[in-house]
């Protein structure tokens, strides 16, 4: 809470609380670094939307737009010479983003990080190395409620090894009448069945509930049981502090179009711990490509592959330049903000404010139930709520009002204030408009015809923005 709010003895529900918090926000200038969508995209004078959907697609940074235009201009002016000339030679373009990416995920250095491909592609490439089933250890542990692409990746990897997903995938589910997994239950499974488990693959932050997993404890428990441990960080990177090297994580992969704001279908990233850096193809099998070599060898065109130690040995082809510099523009805003520590502080404040308003204005009226953990240490930017009615008509009405949030059919709304560009006023506005829509629906039946069948269901139909994962 800001000093001004404390001095005036204001609480979360005071009329000017949000404005005072925004005035005191040390990160308030970061909002001007981004393009805020219009409330009505068809009307140039419609004003800014209230955009709390960074968990699906982050906003365009002005730096990203400028950098992409610079590279387009260089292409026009230099053609092929752009590979080795100019401020950012294309042949080394990934080197512009690996240091900042390494800082955000808690890597020891850039050698533990590679920027390449998309999330699911990277998971497949990494699992070539890190899923090596034996007759005794053949299981992959994942959550039953994982995003659909993780199911596709895991099940197909199992099948490619000649195994049956029905017996080689071990699914974790919450306790009865609970919506999130308990760390002690995950550890218990790893302890009791560790001798059968080859790989643990879990999300850093769960896409549906917004639960932040205890990655350090789970990684330690997996290693104690003799398992390899990897993480899908799609909803964690740029959202919560990460210490992948310190935690001893074997590998991880992430997309960059959510909290990292790289743009739809943006280039993804991968982490491989340095303890695996010098393992040969025979020790740690992987697919090889010309970009996975030292720079001096890439253009020697030799037929013998000379591995570049570390995560970048997994690079197959040269990274796409435009998506890479788009990511660079956003990463520079993270650097300007001071990286994750100040962002996490503001994120906790925003979600606390959102939780308090939602509890008073929405949950207390019986219109919704919060399914994201109440403990701030167990969540990131996103709060998810189970509505008492179908979500689609509600979200459609919010969109008409210039409020952009995310949803999951049939009745979950996901609200995600991103600290780089969202404000306390944004949070207050989304709750105010949601309350108005739900009040309207309670009398008119807006969405209520599907509420009965929707209640308690967790159909995880992906939104278009998540489909790129």
Image (tube, grey):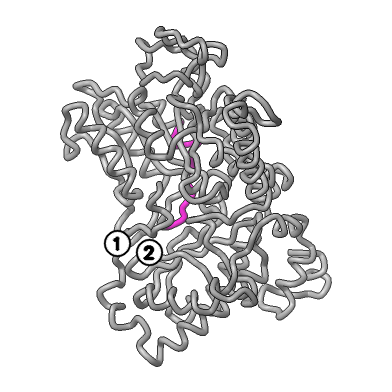
Q: Tell me what residue is drawn at x 43 percent, y 67 percent.
A: 413
N-terminal label among 1 and 2: 2
Residue in front for this viewpoint, 327 or 393: 327
Task: Find disc 1 in the rendering and name its residue.
Answer: 459
Task: Find disc 2 in the rendering and name its residue.
Answer: 408
Task: Check if mark 1's residue and mark 2's residue have beta carbons within 8 Å.
Answer: yes
The stretch in magenta equals 209-219
Q: Residue 107: in sight, yes or no?
A: no
Q: Tell me what residue is drawn at x 48 percent, y 26 percent.
A: 272
- Residue 401 screen position, x and y as percent: 53, 79
Specify the quadrant of the image occupied by residue 122: top left
Specify the quadrant of the image occupied by residue 407: bottom left
Q: Is residue 293 above or below residue 411?
A: above
Q: Secondary structure at mark 1?
A: loop
Mark number for residue 405? none
Q: Quadrant of the N terminus?
A: bottom right
Q: Residue furthest bottom?
A: 443
Classify residue 33 as left or right of residue 390.
Answer: right
């Amino acid at each position: 809470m800001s000093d001004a709010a404390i001095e005036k003895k204001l609480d979360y529900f005071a009329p000017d609380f949000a404005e005072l918090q925004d005035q005191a926000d040390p990160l308030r200038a970061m909002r001007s670094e981004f393009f805020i969508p219009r409330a009505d995209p068809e009307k140039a004078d419609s004003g800014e939307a209230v955009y709390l959907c960074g968990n699906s697609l982050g906003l365009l940074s002005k730096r990203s737009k400028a950098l992409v235009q610079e590279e387009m201009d260089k292409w026009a002016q230099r053609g092929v010479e752009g590979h080795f000339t100019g401020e950012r030679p294309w042949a080394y373009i990934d080197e512009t983003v690996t240091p900042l990416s390494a800082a955000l995920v808690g890597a020891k250095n850039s050698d533990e990080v590679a920027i390449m491909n998309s999330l699911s592609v990277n998971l497949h490439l990494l699992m070539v190395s890190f899923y090596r089933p034996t007759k005794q250890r053949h299981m992959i542990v994942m959550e039953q409620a994982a995003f659909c692409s993780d199911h596709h990746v895991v099940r197909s990897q199992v099948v490619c090894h000649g195994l049956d997903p029905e017996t080689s995938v071990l699914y974790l589910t919450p306790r009865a009448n609970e919506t999130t997994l308990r760390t002690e239950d995950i550890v218990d499974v790893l302890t009791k069945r560790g001798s059968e488990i080859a790989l643990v693959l879990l999300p850093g932050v769960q896409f549906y509930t917004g639960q932040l997993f205890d990655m350090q404890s789970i990684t330690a428990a997996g290693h104690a049981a003799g398992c390899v441990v990897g993480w899908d960080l799609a909803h964690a990177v740029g959202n919560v502090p990460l210490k992948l090297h310190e935690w001893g994580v074997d590998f991880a992969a992430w997309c960059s179009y959510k909290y990292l704001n790289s743009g739809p279908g943006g280039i993804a990233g991968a982490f491989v711990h340095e303890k695996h850096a010098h393992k040969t193809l025979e020790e740690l099998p992987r697919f090889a490509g010309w970009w996975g070599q030292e720079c001096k060898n890439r253009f020697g065109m030799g037929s013998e592959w000379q591995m570049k130690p570390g995560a970048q040995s997994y690079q197959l082809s040269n990274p796409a330049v435009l998506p890479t510099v788009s990511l660079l523009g956003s990463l520079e805003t993270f650097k300007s903000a001071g990286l994750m520590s100040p962002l996490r502080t503001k994120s906790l404040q925003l979600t606390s404010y959102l939780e308090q308003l939602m509890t008073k204005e929405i949950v207390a009226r019986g219109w919704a139930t919060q399914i994201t953990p109440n403990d701030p240490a167990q969540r990131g930017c996103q709060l998810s709520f189970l509505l008492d009615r179908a979500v689609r008509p509600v979200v459609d009405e919010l969109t008409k009002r210039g409020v952009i949030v995310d949803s999951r059919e049939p009745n979950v709304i996901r609200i995600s204030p991103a600290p780089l560009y969202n404000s306390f006023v944004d949070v207050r506005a989304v709750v105010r408009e949601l309350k108005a829509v739900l009040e309207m629906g309670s009398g008119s039946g807006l969405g209520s015809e599907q509420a009965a069948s929707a209640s308690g269901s967790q159909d995880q139909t992906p939104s278009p923005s998540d489909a790129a994962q």
